[in-house]
Amino acid sequence: MTEIVDILLSASFWAAILRIASPLIFATMGELICERAGVLNLGIEGIMVAGAFAGWMAVYAGAPLWVGVAAAMCAGMGFGAMHALLTVPFGLSQHVVGLGITMLATAAAYYAYRLALPEVTNPPRITPFQPLHIPVLSDISWLGQALFSQTALTWAGFATCGITAFVLSRTPLGLAVRAAGENPQAVEAQGLSVGAIRMGAVIVGSGLMAVGGAFLTMSAFSSFFFEMVNGRGWICIALVVFGTWKPGKALLGALLFAGFDALQIRLQQTGLGQIVPYQVFLMIPYLLSILALVLMSRRAEVPAALMTPFNRGDR
Amino acid sequence: MRLEPIAAPGPMRRIGLPALALAATVVVACALSALAGANPARTLGLMITGAFGSKFALLETLNRATPLIFTGLAIAVAFKAKLWNIGAEAQLYAGALLTVLIGTQLGLPGPLAIPLMALGAIAAGALVLLGPALLKTRLGVDEVVTTLLLNFVMALFISYLLEGPLKDPMGMGWPKSPSIPRDARLPRIVDGLRLHWGFALALLCAAGVWVIQTRTTLGYEIRATGQNPEAARFAGIPVTRVIVKTALLSGGLAALAGFSEVAGLEGNLTTDLSASFGYTGIVVAMLALLHPLGVVVSALFVAGIFVGADSMSRAAEVPTYIADILLATALLFMVLAILLTKFRVVRG
Amino acid sequence: MTPKTPAQGPVLRLSGITKRFGNLTANDGISLSLARGEVVALLGENGAGKTTLMNILFGHYTADEGTVQVMGRDLPPGQPGAALKAGVGMVHQHFTLAGNLTVLDNVLLGTRPLLSLSSGRAEARARLAQLARDFGLAVDPDARVATLSVGERQRVEILKALYRDARVLILDEPTAVLTPQEADALFETLRKMTAQGLSVIFISHKLHEVMAISSRVLVLRHGKLVGEVATTDTDRHQLATMMVGAEITTPAPAKARPGAPLLTLEQVSTARHGERPGLTAVDLELCAGQITGLAGVSGNGQGALADLISGLETPTGGRILLAGEPVADWTPRAALDGRIGRIPEDRHKTGTIADFTLTENAVLESYATTATRGWMNWRDARTSTETIIDKYDVRCPGPDTRIRLLSGGNMQKLILGRVLEAAPRIILANQPVRGLDIGAVTYVQEQLIAARDAGAAILLISEDLDEILTLSDSIRVISGGRLSPAFPRGSKTPAELGQWMAGQGFNHAA
């Protein structure tokens, strides 16, 4: 028990939560935007891989870090555009297309990696984002280390959440996106194009997912490994449900989830880790996600037109 | 643009468009190998000979196709009922686990052990999918995410077993299980040829699933439930029970892939027993348009791409991941082509 | 910025509109013009081409030939929104509202530049209040649309158009979902609008309403404009003949001779599902040889009652008795086994499976009883389907055709055949003629009367009060999940029933 208290009191634990949550926040916001517009994007896992690779590769090839982030975003938007084209105007199964995009994006990243670095066994490192020193705040003794020792990309993640929330609830664009996910006929009847709104949402959302992936290679770690995304995309889908499709609640979910993750990593080092096999700790994130889905299952706040394709003229 | 249904699509559309999808995949293959600086024609030639060009290659492809037929059938059965089982990977490992447990722990004679291993595997796989199926029918929890997440949980569970209680003491520290005895392995179909009875069992299962789908009330109920659950329920079909039965069937079929790989090929369980057979099964099933006999053909095709790409990449400087890209593109092109056989795109 | 209305000349002019879908010509050279402050009725059966014409006007379809002019200017074809911007508003039969958004948000949707940073809710609220006052369209701007009644939702739809400064308002079957009293209130609003110079196109197939509100009537049949008359120069009979192309014969059922009760509900209540009300302590008796008509505004518990009798819904209180015997496990299967035949409200969603063949659809309810040990009996299934096709005149290439290729009328005939061939004792007919053309309507109604005369107990649910009045031997009104007493044929006027539909009269009963 004292070990847990020690963990909770350590500044590094709280810093880790913010770090672990960052990629989830980006990708969860991306998925949330897609779903609010009525499109389930199961391409998320692969798009995160592609983003992780593209951002890292760009920086490895000499680009500045922020250009790397932009490269990741572009890669994500590219795969998002494919997803959007197939699921919106053509109205194909969002399950099948999403899984197909995940396979395609993952394989494309691995293929490109092997082409770029044919003989390499250990992936080269880049200089990742460094913790941003915030005057005054970062210098507060415990708190500064716990909460204000993050990279700029983490802060960008929080900003993304704020912007997503603002746009969705306070602007005409957000209203159009929400209406497209609730009743596309209503959108079309008011002279807006459901197709354009949904495609735009999927492309932008996919861009954010890719930035979430890029956080792994450009901020959390400094190189690209196979299978480094490791189901984070699927967890983000669970987080969207857990957050009842609201940015603020989804952010809270991501932080809560990151908290458990940070805790289980630290518990592995304690006496508990001697008794319980490490695989059990590693299972916790996935089991928690399933639990979150079960707990939220009775809440019927899902966008009414989620996964319902819209074909103009049909009624 | 708008989609308009075609009342009676002609043969040009029905055959031409899927053929075009495959042709487009070949174009992608050429582009990818050109990107790698290889001669596209040579790459394709190497892939085809590598997959089908010799007796050894062909047997390798058949062996590779065997688990894919099982997982492809599992997915086809489930998707037919719109039960999105993306967890064939976990069900496969559950089947493999029971196969190893029964094969190594009970000390039964071969003729008794083999059917028991198969049944145990089926039960384990069915059980793994039962959870998500019940969560779906009882609580409305989306099974895509739960089955996906269970794949990761199962992988960790197997990893724990292989490093702990099930670790082979003679394994020189590798995380693998003890091997099942020789007489409890699936025999080869023809002596001297590396092809085991698992392949025959896969064919049998394909035929069985086909009979179930077209001739039995269960198959009819599964199709009705998948196509329109509301109408099915209205007509008195016990939709919930049908979904659960489908889950048991699907999970059992996926688990047989694990059984067949362990009892027919490897003899033991490792964490890399499956080369993503569970996920690839989705492509196999979709390319077959969820038709159980089509699954056999598409499994051979998909296995051919993998075996061919492996063999090709040893001779040409093209990474084997080309196979995964080709499968994903074939899948996406094919679903689009199938849609366009039923609808035409019109302006306004 | 109110669009300028020209001093003279039509506000809207469609010239020579032609639209073909494959071999079908949905609109054949239709021309129409609308003057300022005028109400024109567009009359036609289902499938006459009214909806296609409106879809062309709104840019959802592109016409093969012809032009659309608003205020003297050509509209670009195929651009949804062009008509809206030019000042044409439409209230669709199926409302186009997002239920989970507020009234204000539904009105605001698409009215501001998408990239603007402010929602503009404050100004919108003020304008909405002003419009509501001007036209008598009171509605709470902050209410979620899903919580509103059907009549209120229609007001929101009209407000949406007015908010965009519409000069032309098109209403598609606006009274189908209203009580007679609500319809009168709607007409009052329309008169206020025309007094202020707005023009209205009123799409309907209800002749008395057309006579009451319009100044001119245009009649469409099979995609062609077959007549144009001033309302004062015509009568219902002439309009009906123009619309159908022949004299209409409404079935006139002989007097019923009711027998014993076959289905009895005793104080049955069901659960509420979201916005859909459940039933509250409902007593109902369906007797052999009698058609009981259920009148009411949609969304007042018809769905719950239909689902209950279909077996989809189980009661939370009270008893269901089949021929006097209380039932235990209540499921769709149990209802079928109790020989209840069900014609569902939505033949596409619940009645059939689109990609199944006619045979597969015909045996949906009977496959389990004809199967032997889990094996389907396809040969018998095919034979019995052929019987239905012959006997009920289902026009189709054959029993192996996918049912989605059939017209609505033929689909309904197959469902009717499926129900009647099982020789049901009780028939639930939920909106059995909705969306059918006159020929199919008459056919279905005659079959129901024949089944009644053969001794079946029939519950007819319809939003069309005329249909209820024509066919029913006894009428019950449903409102807020409660049932009125039984009114024998001819004992209540439509206006009196309308008061019950609006919920009056239940108070002392409750």
Image: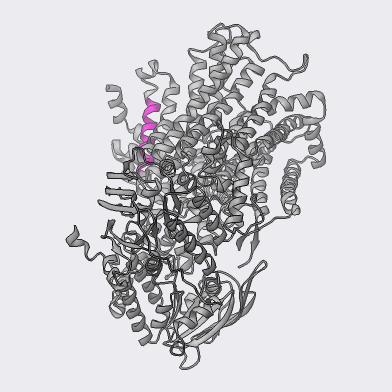
Residue sitting at x 49%, y 17% = B161
Q: Position of residue B252 (x, y in %)?
A: 55, 26
Residue placed furthest toward the bottom: C8
Residue C172 in which image quadrant:
bottom left
Residue sitting at x 32%, y 63% = C149
- In magenta stretch: residue C112: no
Q: Position of residue A172 (x, y in %)?
A: 41, 64
Q: Position of residue C166 (x, y in %)?
A: 42, 79
Pick the residue in front: C152 or A89: C152
The magenta stretch is A252-266
In the depicted structure, whether residue C351 falls above or below residue A259: below
Q: Position of residue C472 (x, y in %)?
A: 37, 63
Q: Quadrant of the N terminus of chain A?
A: top left
Q: Is residue C258 left or right of residue B333?
A: left
**Is residue A203 among the parts visible in the rendering?**
no
Residue sitting at x 27%, y 48% = C266
- In magenta stretch: residue A255: yes
Look at the magenta stretch and give its main secondary structure. helix
Check the image and tell me how it is coloured: one colour
Pick the residue in front: B84 or B170: B84
Tally of marks? 0
Pick the residue in front: C418 or A134: C418
Pick the residue in front: C374 or B274: C374
**Is residue B46 among the parts visible in the rendering?**
yes
Residue A89 in which image quadrant:
bottom right
